[in-house]
Image: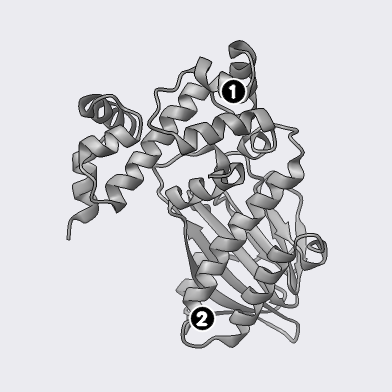
Amino acid sequence: MRNTDIISDVFSTLRISGDLYFRADLRGDFSIEIPEEHRCIRFHLVRQGRCHVTVPNSPTSKIQEGDLAIIPNGVKQTLASNPESIGKTLAEILAEGDLADGVLTYGNGDRQTRLLCGFCSFDQSVDHPVLANLPNLIIVRPADLGREPWTAAAMRLLALEADLDTQGTSGILARMLEILFIQTVRQMTSHHGGSGNGFIAALSDIHLTKALNAIHTRLDEPWTVASLAAEAGMSRARFARKFASGVGIPPVDYLTRWRLIKARSLLSHSALDMSEIANRCGYASTPSFSRRFKQTYGIGPGSYRRSKIAP
């Protein structure tokens, strides 16, 4: 695995899955309050017109045709024709029966705003640092993607499929939302320059990336802070400080967390026996693996696996 594949490993293990909420046809003066939803990455693609997006602790942002708003942390948000508009909650609008055939219709007037609204979800019990330090709102504008042709191409395909609306469109749109989110995180990593804190910044640091790559590619090895520091080419003390500051948690905590996340994925999506999963995830014995898994998730690995295959 190349260093840049750490992102792929993280997101494939987290099993992020995209889907659509609805298409929105909004007219005149409108304001829709969307409630918080934990562990949900939301998307709003503007197909026509414009609107304003407001989330906590961020300035209101105006988005217009072709722009994509990403709300990574499931925080509450407001979509409005202007920031001063007073409107209704999404639940109130849906209760009035304004959603039919996958299209949400709201408001009156000649001015029209059309949105494609979707989301990505993932295992709510999984807590990985890649999601912890993302901003509450990310705006992807085609005009800003001149040096990111792959993201621009994905945006064009998303827009074309949204207009096509035929057999297979919903599945393709869902996958495109997943792709665009991963591309956006990758873009933030490449533009970070190694400054700041958080997993994204850590992937821009050559020393921390060496240690992270060692964890992700050789998870079964008996890693210690000293051996990870040697992989990073740093002294033990300096590495421990830099890793904790950069990634947000100490190296042993990250190692343990990733081992359990990987084990959780293998329990759900493989037929490997318990001892093989324990071995692949770096545990010397099945009992020690079982104890740590139950301590973290409140359920033993065997019970967890059975819950995933129950009819």
218, 286: nearer the viewer: 218
> Where residue 98 appears, x then y in whole percent?
51, 80
- Any part of residue 83 in sight: no
> Is the residue 69 above or below the residue 168 in the image?
above
- What amino acid is found at the position of numbered circle 2 in the picture? Thr
**Image marks 2 and 1: residues in contact by CB distance under 8 Å:** no
- What amino acid is found at the position of numbered circle 1 in the picture? Ala
> Is the residue 171 above or below the residue 16 in the image?
below
> Where residue 46 appears, x then y in whole percent?
69, 72
- In the rendered structure, the answer to whether residue 210 lies left or right of residue 50 reads left
226, 307: nearer the viewer: 226
Q: Which image quadrant for residue 41? A: bottom right
Q: CA distance from mark 2 to mark 1?
A: 43 Å
Label 1, on which residue?
244
> Where residue 129 appears, x then y in whole percent?
54, 37
Q: Upstream in the sequence, badge 2 or badge 1?
A: 2
Secondary structure category for the residue under label 2: helix
Mark seen at residue 90 = none
* Quarter of the C terminus within the rendering: bottom left
> Where residue 125 appears, x then y in whole percent?
39, 42
> Is the residue 112 above or below the residue 88 in the image?
below
Label 2, on which residue?
169
